[in-house]
Image: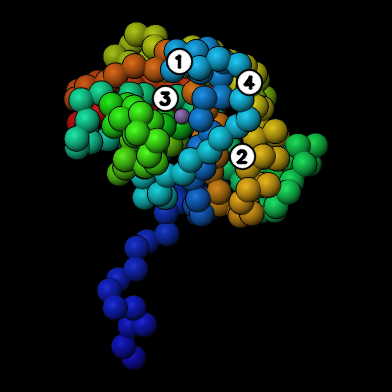
């Protein structure tokens, strides 16, 4: 029988789950913008604005197994590739109009992620009032470590979050400083889109974002989760 596709379909994108062989299949990648006050300030904003979202394509993931070093190619067109260390929330049960009080029932687990950003291109799009995709949604823009199921993840939403580049601290904060916490983020997100099992939410980055160059090694941590190590090729 002939194939039902005109060419081979892309493989299902998935992320390893700590402590078990079955993998987490990815549906969508949502990201929250400016969700730590000191990062909002360094980007030229102040105050608590309503949360806002953008997406990355699922094939933006650079999936890094525990103890391994992921490789991210330095992307085209940019001269200012920024790191953003983030707690990633993995959705296990979908829904729409989820209330913050019920949000945790929908969470499968947590991971450490990097929202890599072509800051110069994003800045140009902001200036022109155009979409951020070229700055945010490019290939290999979303490195991620293994997902840890909620029961084994400790208190990820109050954990220390940090990023070192070549052994030097760049970002260090605590997830409890999120302007919109994980439950509130899920409430807002699920009012706009119906969440599905397999959705990932990059919850925002603390202050200290800065450029990396080829050869740099990034070590991202959220206390209690596997460390994410990525080298820029
Ligand atoms: Mn971000």
Work out which residue is located at the far front of the displayed protein and give it: 128
In x, y percent, where is residue 229?
A: 36, 27
Label 3 neighbour load within 10 Å: few <14, some 14-19, many 20+:
many
Considering depth in this image, is 223 or 138 the residue closer to the camera? 138
Say what secondary structure mark 4 lies in: loop
Q: Quadrant of residue 49?
A: top right
Mark identifier at residue 48 = 4
Q: Position of residue 226 (x, y in %)?
A: 49, 29
For mark 3, give the secondary structure: loop
Is label 1 or label 2 in front?
Answer: 1
Gap in angstroms between the C-alphas marked 1 and 2: 32 Å
- Quickly name the residue at label 1: 44
- Residue 58 lies, in percent from the top left, at 42, 50
Q: Earlier in the sequence, mark 4 or mark 3?
A: 4
Work out how far the residue at label 4 is from the one at label 2, CA to CA, in angstroms: 27 Å
Give the CA distance from mark 4 to mark 3. Answer: 20 Å
State the SS at label 1. loop
Q: CA distance from mark 1 to mark 3?
A: 16 Å
User: Is 126 located above or below residue 139 in the figure?
Assistant: above
- Which tag, 3 or 2, sits closer to the chain's start? 3
- The residue located at (45%, 15%) in the rendering is 44
The disc, 1 or 3, on the residue closer to the chain's N-terminal end is: 1
Q: Pointers 3 and 2 in contact (CB under 8 A)?
A: no
Label 2: which residue?
109
Label 3 sits on residue: 84
Q: CA distance from mark 4 to mark 1?
A: 13 Å
């Amino acid at each position: 029988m002939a194939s039902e596709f005109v060419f081979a379909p892309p493989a299902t994108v998935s992320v390893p789950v700590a402590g078990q062989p079955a993998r987490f299949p990815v549906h969508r990648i949502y990201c929250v913008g400016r969700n730590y006050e000191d990062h909002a300030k360094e980007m030229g904003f102040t105050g608590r604005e309503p949360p806002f979202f953008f997406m990355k394509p699922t094939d933006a993931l650079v999936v890094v197994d525990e103890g391994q070093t992921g490789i991210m190619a330095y992307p085209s067109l940019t001269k200012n590739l920024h790191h953003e260390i983030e707690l990633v929330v993995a959705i296990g049960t979908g829904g729409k109009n989820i209330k913050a009080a019920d949000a945790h029932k929908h969470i499968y687990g947590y991971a450490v992620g990097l929202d890599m950003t072509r800051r110069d291109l994003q800045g140009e799009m902001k200036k022109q009032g155009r979409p951020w995709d070229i700055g945010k949604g490019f290939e290999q823009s979303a490195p991620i470590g293994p997902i840890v199921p909620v029961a084994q993840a400790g208190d990820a939403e109050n954990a220390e979050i940090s990023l070192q580049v070549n052994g030097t601290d760049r970002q260090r904060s605590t997830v409890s400083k999120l302007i919109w916490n994980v439950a509130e983020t899920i409430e807002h997100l699920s009012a706009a889109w119906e969440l599905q099992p397999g959705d990932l939410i990059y919850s925002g980055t603390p202050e200290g974002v800065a450029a990396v160059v080829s050869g740099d090694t990034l070590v991202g941590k959220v206390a209690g989760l596997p460390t994410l190590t990525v080298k820029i090729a």
